[in-house]
Amino acid sequence: MSRAPSPRGTPRTSVKDRISKRTMLLRKAKKWVRPICWGLFAVTVVGTVGLAVRTVAPGGTIASLRERLGGSTGFTGLRVAHVTIEGRANTPEPLLRAAIGVTIGDPILGFSVEAARARIETLTWVEQATVERRLPDTVVVAIVERRPFAIWQNEKKFHLIDRAGQIVANQDVALFKDKLPMVVGAAAPAGAADLLKQLDKYPALSARILASVRVGERRWNLHLKNGIDVMLPEGHETEALERLMQLQQEHALMDRPLTNIDLRLPDRLVVRPRVETAAAKPGAATALPPPPPPAPPAVIPTVAKRPT
């Protein structure tokens, strides 16, 4: 027996094709599952905060409140499972983790991110740090390290300094011996950036320099690898370096047996020749002869070029 068509000519839906009321209710319920879960979570957190506040004594501190809050929320699963560090290259990892002050299993709400950040930024390698809590179980630490700019020698001690003259580290300095220039003297860090910026224009000269020595707080001497000291004038380093490179090109001045090249006077060049001592013969007496008197400086007048 065939079914009668519907009044409008469309086929009727069978009973089996109809959606049951139970299915419809389940579909509607799914829309409310997530909001309900978040609501329960919020109620739990608010309740534990209220419990912690009530249990703090009148003279209690924020730290004690945080500890109580962390302990109260630990049972909900809000514990540290991961500590992620970003941006570390030279900062010693044990020192960094000690400054963070968080270990796996600690309540993630039981520590201060601001206090952790402040501790991390006391490390000499660290210029800036951020600490984030990412619920439910991750702490993310991102640091920006200072970039070592030069090696500073002062009173037989060596330090790594950045471009601003701030000490970066005083350990493992030897690892940077062949990578960074050396500056010497108590006042060297303050003026190192300006001098080294000018020396960058002359790579051939920079390759000859063993150390740049700050004389007082006024000027620089360049101590070359062959033992020559180039004495630069105060405040006129650019002109003196240009003049030195011109003399090197024309007369190979820095390859000569000299102890000093004095460029402090703009209208003349003063050099001091090196006095060579005779080599000791085999079997000679061990007593050393008295040092020879220093050779007198040679003054070479120079004529300044007229402006064209």
Image (spheres, helix red, strand yellow):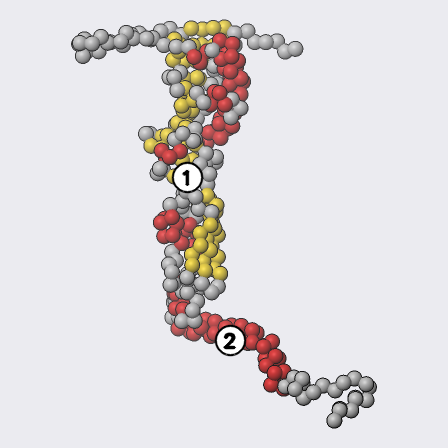
Would residue 197 be visible to someone looking at this image? yes
Query: x, y percentage for residue 282?
Result: 20, 9
Element at badge 1? strand
Who's the residue at 67% across and 84% down the image?
17
Circles 1 and 2 in contact, beta carbons < 8 Å: no
Q: Quadrant of residue 169?
A: top left
Query: x, y percentage for residue 222?
Result: 43, 21
Query: x, y percentage for residue 307?
Result: 63, 11
Query: x, y percentage for residue 132?
Result: 48, 57
Element at badge 2? helix
In the picture of the structure, the residue carrying the numbered disc 1 is: 168
On residue 40, the disc is 2
Q: Amino acid at mark 2?
A: Leu
The residue positioned farthest toward the bottom in the image shown:
1
Of the image marks 1 and 2, the number of the one nearer the N terminus:
2
The answer to whether residue 306 is left or right of residue 70 is right
Up-down: is 211 above or below 300? below
Nearer to the camera, 54 or 12: 12
Nearer to the camera, 187 or 245: 245
Would residue 152 be visible to someone looking at this image? no
Q: Label 2: few (<14), some or many (≥20) within 10 Å?
A: few
Q: How far separated are the C-alphas under marks 1 and 2?
A: 49 Å
Q: Quadrant of residue 26?
A: bottom right
**Which is more foreground, mark 1 or mark 2?**
2
Q: Quadrant of residue 39?
A: bottom right
Who's the residue at 35% across and 37% down the image?
172
The residue positioned farthest toward the front in the image shown:
1
Nearer to the camera, 242 or 79: 79
Q: Amino acid at mark 1?
A: Val
